[in-house]
Image (cartoon, helix red, strand yellow):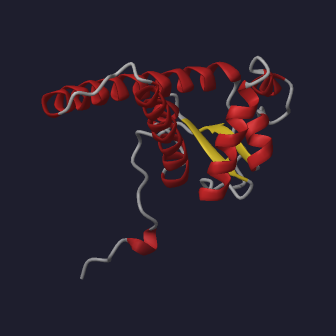
Amino acid sequence: MSAIERPYAGIVSRTVALAIDAATLTIGFAIASGVLGLILSLFTAVEISSPGAVLSAAALWSIVVATYFVGFWTLAGETPGMRLMALRVIDAAGDRPGLGRSLLRLVGMILAAIPFFAGYLLILVDDRRRGLQDMLAGTTVIYAPKSSAHTPPPAAAIPSSP
């Protein structure tokens, strides 16, 4: 991490970011499922209430959610909900987590939710505000506001005029 100390994100801002992500996923999946269902109904006689269809939809939903979180953490260090709340997930070096850490963090999120979300309550007592998912993956969530001020380039990067 840099010499500047970064403030750790608390449980409220992290919960709001997760709620934004959940709403985004739910609305997007509902629209995509509706369109796909409409298209399939034109060409096939699919029984939507069959156990196979329900299990297929649940499996597809799980893959979409996993890809969403792991993809955004790995590629950007933040999900759209985290971006709106000015949060970023980082590893011990201050970088965005790699694929392995992101996958481990996702498993940690699931485990943290199982006993009445007790794994998330660790955020309230940990000195770096880490939940079970962060402890397992070696990550931390920080506030990372985007500065609107333009930072000028260093003097060495500015070409001198003749």
Residue 158 horizontal side relative to residue 13, left or right: left
- Foreground pick, 66 / 38: 38
Q: How many marks?
A: 0
Residue at 34% x, 22% y: name it. 48
Q: Is residue 50 above or below residue 105?
A: above
Looking at the image, the residue that sits furthest to the bottom is: 162
Q: Quadrant of residue 156?
A: bottom left
Where residue 46 sits, quadrant-wise, is top left
Is residue 162 among what the camera can see? yes
Quadrant where the N terminus lies?
bottom right
On the image, the x and y values in percent for residue 69 come to 53, 41
Q: Position of residue 82 (x, y in %)?
A: 52, 33
Q: Nearer the viewer, residue 71 or 79?
A: 71
- Toward which corner of the image does residue 89 lie, by quadrant? top right
Can you give x and y, in whole percent of width and height, for residue 120 in the image?
Answer: 75, 25
Determine if residue 98 is in view.
Answer: no
Q: 25 or 156: which is nearer to us? A: 25
Which residue is rendered at x = 26% and y = 77% of the image?
A: 161
Say above or below: 14 vs 116.
below
Question: Considering the image in quadrants, where does the C terminus appear?
Answer: bottom left
Q: Position of residue 140 (x, y in %)?
A: 71, 42
The residue shown at (64%, 41%) is 106
